[in-house]
Amino acid sequence: MAKQISELKLGILGGGQLGRMLIQEAINYNLTTLVLDPDADAPCKHIANKFECGSITDFDTVYNFGKKADIITIEIEKVNIEALEQLEKEGKQVFPQARVIRLIQDKGIQKQFFKENDIPTAPFQLVNSKEEMLNSAFSYPYILKQRRDGYDGKGVMKINTAADVENAFDAPSLIEELVDFDKEIAVIVARNAKGDMKTFPMVEMEFNAEANLVEFLISPSTYPESIQERAEKIAVDIATALNITGILAVEMFVTKNGEILVNELAPRPHNSGHQTIEGNYVSQFEQHLRAIFNLPLGDTRSISNAVMINLLGEKGHDGVAKYDGLEKIMAIDGVYVHLYGKKYTKPFRKMGHVSVVDQNRDHAIEKARFVQQTLKVIS
């Protein structure tokens, strides 16, 4: 007889807030969790059954860690793929699969995958040097993205004129047409090993222009049904083409003329799904566990309107974190606070999030704006 979920050990590469929220769900299933992270004070440290401080990019460290687990998953893509491939060869279950992480680690390969699978995305060109950028047929302004290791707005820059090329990354990159978009949206899709799939309702995002991070997220979307259905179909098509097991976040643009273009993918729980903890019948974290353990997928419907606010470290504050205004926001109905267990704050560091749930969408947004103005992470 197959082992039950509570008899298995889940190895998580990365011990940040995504791992922490995954463990918070795993506890409900009596799951044993093992975590590997290079930071001795990572957010998962005190809640994992076993926490190991070590590099997630080193072959031996990842390989030896993976041998102790039954199923291995990630909360960040920057991991040692070769070690995961070796573990798969030896019969370990790695979800998302190593080949999926390999594809998503490189934005250039990711873009080519979109092209080959007829997934709508902005026109792009791969470049290896500033010279290639200057010789490109792309008209200014355009977006330059490093192919590897960019996250949370890092590794992305806007090139306005030929003069900007001088300060561009000197690493394999891609340039893409600047999309004149109306809004950034996201759809999270889950797929288990049986091939069952479910999407969460499409969400709308607002970005902090300075940090290039999601600052505000509204669920569900109020775009016409036709646009929402198209976005969900694109997410399902990508998950199918990747043959992924686990959760996949698909970030997209809706252009001014109603086109949908895929921006990028994350093969793990994602910032654009945090509101599901209180706002949906199943959270993205529980759904990820259901998918990787090949269990029936949960009900993704929204219970209510939900707005998620990222708590970012304030500018000019570096040191032990203090949360100013916490009591004021907790006096409001439907406000849920999630702090990530990070001892130190620095400008724009993700320190937590707050979800606001209300049956009235306008009230939810109003409360969320109040939270945004009132709760500050200072040192």
Image (cartoon, helix red, strand yellow):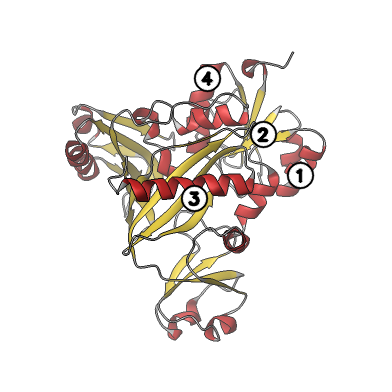
Residue that numbered label 4 is attached to: 27
4 or 1: tag closer to the N-terminus: 4
Measured in 3D between alpha carbons, the distance from the residue under mark 2 to the one under mark 4, in whole angstroms, is 17 Å
Residue that numbered label 3 is attached to: 234
* Side of 138 where 88 appears, left or right: right
Residue that numbered label 2 is attached to: 72
Q: In which quarter of the image is the C terminus?
A: top left
Q: In this view, does 156 lie above or below 47?
A: below
* Residue at the farthest right position: 90
Identified by mark 1, the residue type is: Glu
Residue placed most toward the observer, 57 or 254: 254
Of helix, strand and loop, which one carries label 1?
helix
Disc 2: CA contacts within 10 A as few (<14), some (14-19) or many (>=20): many
3 or 2: tag closer to the N-terminus: 2
Residue 66: % across, % down: 72, 34
Of helix, strand and loop, which one carries label 3?
helix
Of helix, strand and loop, which one carries label 2?
strand
Residue that numbered label 1 is attached to: 85
